[in-house]
Image: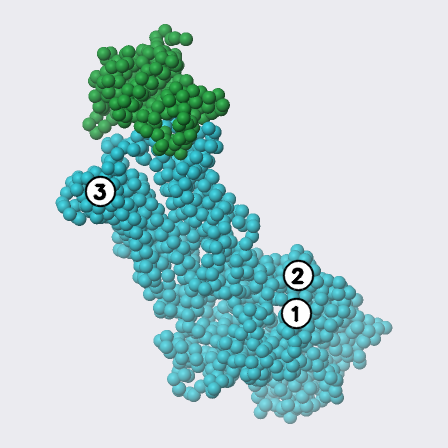
Amino acid sequence: MQQEDGDLAVAGLTKEFVSEAGRLTILNGVGLKMRRGEALAVTGPSGSGKSTLLYILGMLDRPTSGSVRLLGEDPFARTDAQLAGFRNAKIGFVFQDHHLLPQCDVLENVLIPALAGAGAGAAESQRAMQLLERVGLKNRVTHRPAQLSGGERQRVAVCRALINQPALFLADEPTGNLDRSNAEAVGDLLLELNQTHQTLLVCVTHSAELAARFPRRAELVDGRLVDR
Amino acid sequence: MTHFRLLLRNLLYHARTNTAVVLGVIAATAVITGALIVGDSVRGSLREMSLERLQKIDDVLIAPRFVREDLARELAAQPVFKERFDTAAPALMLSAPFVAEHGGISRRAGGVQIFGGDERLWQLINIKPPYLTGDEMAINERLAERLRVHAGDDVSLLIEVPSAIPRESLLGKREGDFREIQFKIKAVLPDDSGSARLTLNPTQQLPLNAFVPLGKLQRSVDLARVERSRRNPQGSEAQINALFVSAKSPRDQTGASAPEAARSLSDELSGLLVPADLGLRIAVDSPRGYVSVESEQQILDSDMAAAVTESAKRLGLTTSPVLVYLANELTNVNDPKKFSMYSVVAGLDPVTATNPPFGPFVWASPVPSHPLGPDEIVLNDWIAQDLAAKPNDDVRLRYHIIGSHGELPEVEHTFRVAGILKLEGPAADPGLVPVVKGITDAKTINDWKQPFPMKLDRVTPRDDRYWDEHRATPKSFVSLETAQKLWGSRFGSLTSVRVASKAGQTVEQTAADMRRELLKSLKPAQTHLQFQPVKYTGVQAAAGSNDFSELFLGFSFFLILAATFLIGLIFRLGIERRGTTIGLLAAVGFTPRRLRWLFLEEGLILVAVGGLLGTVVAVGFAELMVYGLTHWWTQAVGTQSLSVFIVPSTLAMGFVFSAIVTALAVLWGLRQLKALSPRELLSGATEPAISAVRQRRRSRRSLAIGTALLVLAGVLLLGVLTGRLQGEAFEGLSWGVVLFFLDGVIILVGGVMLIAGLLDGEHSAAVRGHGLTGLARLGVRNTARQRQRSTASVSLVAAATFVIVAVAAGRRNPAAEAPDKNSGNGGFRLVAESSEPILPDLNTSAGRTALGMKLKPGSPDETLIKDSRFFAFRVKPGEDASCLNIYQTRLPTILGVPKSFIERGGFRFIGRSEPNPWTLLEQTEPDGSIPVIGDANTLQYSLHKEVGTTIAVPDEEHPQHTLKIVGMLDGSVFQGVLLMSDDNFRKAYPNVEGYKYFLIESPGSAAEADHLSDVLETQLTQFGFDAERVSDRLANFLAVQNTYLSTFQTLGGLGLLLGTLGLATVMVRNVLERRKELALLNALGLRPSGLAWLVLVETAVLLLCGLATGTIAAFVAMVPHLASTGADVPWGSLALILAVVFFVGMLGALLASIEAARTRILEALRSE
């Protein structure tokens, strides 16, 4: 069910840091509305606050002011523990560094969010296998991260982000550490899965090539999000 | 994927870090559980020693007087005995000095315990046949070593023939009757045999023991059986003073029923006693129709006199108590030429004694109208005529009193003659005077074998004639009250209680009735013939005066702390390494609680595994500690007979305790999970982000607090040094001592705060200079990189160094201390003890002569003794409650403090502001308790008492006296004893005679004191006089304390080492975290050796900061002690510990720097 003002509604979002030189405003009244199935690429120069925005959208950081509503809910009204549960159920992350657990194999890494949530049972394992099959890693399920290439690792990270069928799919420089062909493949994968799973996809990237493939693009300029 | 699977993956993947944590847990568990095992081992070993030293002896009767040897046989024949007990062995236990001549050198050993026994005793203490016969003797190894003798050698012992008459009574022998007896050593008993260790007091110290045939010992001291003969119509039975009994059931041996078993033995024995066993005589005077109950010691003690009177009362018999005394001279005051020598005066009022058979008296003068007053006397007509005295004349009576050192000053008392009796009827009764061998049976006064000087030249023919006709029949009478006031003593105030026969009953029947009734009525507590369940009490005492578990936990405190710190640190470092993983888990929805729980579970598994392994290692650690106690720190326990005892419940307790401690360390390691946000964790942060403003503020705050504390320390120092802060703070500690220590602690905390502030502060121009200096500057700067880690490492090293240096600096050597009246030596040079009581006063030439000392007049030896001042103390032997005894003690030896000593004062008291706290001993307590003073170590650690508390004597069950602690001495030579005033002592222990403990003031040098000691020991050999320097005895006591300090220093040093390993771990971790940075420096052209130098400087700075802060603070804290003459800092071992710590720390840094130098540039600079 779609919300009237968007499945993701961000309004007046600001984030300030206090430093020696005084207050430093990173985000200055960011506003954003998105509906399921939409994919947004956020670009901007280094230090413009792209990652900060992403972490706030991903409930890993709290804003100084403003509101974020996901599927009509205000997650920041929750306690840290409730927030973790919300994040587990509604949000999927892909980072520049894949952050796979080196001690776990591919399948186990994909199942980690399930473990944090309702549990990693047979259904979750089956879904993980489907995701891995989709990203072409069906035959690598028992491999450890160290046995995978950079692109393969990032694909595992994408599967992990989607295992709990999140509403919001956040990617922070997902191709930053990949070569051109792997970067393209991961970009394709993100957009395809966004459509398949009808998620809200927000991708922060420096890559103009990747951003160009997104139907909706915005740039962070002086702490504000400007549609391009 | 399951939770458990994730846990398992984590454990296995991080095996190296986890192994390090497990090793830390093993170390902590081993130390904690090991300490508990040491406690069990000491307790178990003491228990074993109790069982070993007593062998089959379970109950012992030590009689205060000699009793019949046949009592053993009679007791063993009782059905009750046969039911519960096995053997009753009679024994004679005496103490005597031994002398052995070997190659012209004479060696002495005082205070040897001689056991005279027969095969019954030998079987009980496991001495194997063939048994000792004739003049054969077995001695223990310790005595053999002291005398340097072997089997087949001869030894002689100087033994005093016991006398029933108190030494400090008029008729007692003051000098003692010593006999030298030769024995041949048949066997030397090894120290690990039970008999060699036989002693009835709970102590782990080896006694000096000798075993001889009972018959030979009895014959040597006139206690053997004497057959009836014409000369000795009574004869006498063989006598003993100890009975050893073995019980059948373990419950009666060491179990709950042991005290009751001992009571049943005492009750059985009571039924077998005869008057002789109580030192009583029941003399029958058939013609006069009464029996007279008298004492072998010539004076009936108060308890016995009361028991006799009560028994007679129950039988409906009339009694007449009497006290007779010897008057040296009776003189007519009006005509001093009229006098009579050596007559008996009776405390018996002839005016009131009107009923037969004790009266009526026949008067030669008018009968006085009233009972005799305090200054009235009645003479018989013989002495009245002799003195030409008539009623209302004054007569002067001269008599001896007994001084505190047995001297016999003569005093006089003038009486008014109240009447004159005819020397007939009751007045002519020689039975009023108890039989005194050598006096009452002498033919003439000249033949008396009296122990006091007599003016025989003044004995007149008339005196001789009276003696010839009437013997000791009293010539004069005073009231009993007057006699008791003038001549009563602590031994009693009656010489006999006469009991009249009933009408129609023969005197013999009365005597039999009295005998039966008296023996029936006397309880063991009154006769003092009580069996003690020695094995039971020995086992109880094995609980120990100090809990060695606690002691070793204390000693190992820093070891445990360091291990715990290391566990927390390694665990924390492990978690820091997994920061991004944690961040990821948080990002995908793991709640903070679940994350903490996941890592806590991981930590707890490590704790459990480490704990189990550590429990096994703990046994080895305990073995090592027990080895240390029996080889390196022997003075702490005074024995080498300790072995390891493993109690399963202790292992379980150690495991649980260690698990709690190490789990807390894990929790501490997890603490930062809370402080870091998932974003910070994902970015690889290990400490919470802090703004520069906050960091600067924190730095300023730390610097301000640190500086303020150091200024405060300076102000306090100034206050102490300028004398503004003086006097006693508390517990005997001066403000100076307290403030210096406080100053040390403030410097420690202030120093660490300053370092923390500096680490937080701005470091301008850190990149400056060139070469090693420039790199060193950068290395110093790097210490601030991980501020929390650096501060924690410096704090631990500083605190551990502080404690170790302060403890080491606290060592004392009293041998270096000069005599000081207000110190632990009280200003005395020598302390001496004698195995036999010494009565005469060593301060007087008369006393020295009486002791048989042969000193050439004017000789240096005589001058040395004359210039010295002797203070003699009476001794009631008890348990050794000094720190040299690790058994739990209840009633220590008690010393009677002479008046002269109380007036002299001296020594250092805790918490007393009176000018002379010794006078507290003379105060009267409202509750009737007896004030006593003790050494703080004895009171606090052995007896667990404090000022104001009481001790029931001899035990809680049958308290006869209550001792109240009124003062506490600080580090005195009186460790292990309690002190009460001589006046109170004589009342509490009337039967303890003479002096056996001496403190000697000697103005000369230490060498002269040593010579004085030699002279005294030689001249007083027969008394087993053994003198040593007070400083040596204090050093002996302090050796225990110093050994504890050494133990603490060793274990604390290990802890410091472990802490240093923690620091090294931090350094290795820092290097690993900074591989990229180091690789970059390498890429920029810095050589590997330069990288190593960088890391080494960083470590050295942190180590030196910690070591210097701790050392400076410790030395400031210990300034008052270091300034004292007795300070004995073990500089060598202290420097060694600190050097090893620095070396190990730098070794860790070296490993880290090698790792730094090996860093490959490209690999490290890559992200992955």
Q: Are marks 3 and 2 on the same chain?
A: yes
According to the rendering, which colour does chain B have?
cyan
Displayed quadrant of residue B474: bottom right
Neighbourhood count class around disc 1 (C-alpha, 10 Å): few under 14, some 14–19, many 20 upward? many
Distance from the alpha carbon under mark 2 to that under mark 1: 13 Å
Marker disc for residue B781: 3
Front-most of B898 and B1129? Answer: B1129
Name the quarter where the C terminus of chain A is drawn: top left
Q: Earlier along the polypeptide chain: callout 2 or callout 1?
A: 1
Disc 3, SS: helix
Q: Earlier along the polypeptide chain: callout 3 or callout 2?
A: 2
Q: The chain shown in green is which?
A: A
Residue for point 39% across, 35% down = B671
Residue B137 shown left or right of residue A146 in the figure: right
Residue occupying the far right of the picture: B504
Of circles 3 and 2, which is in front? 3
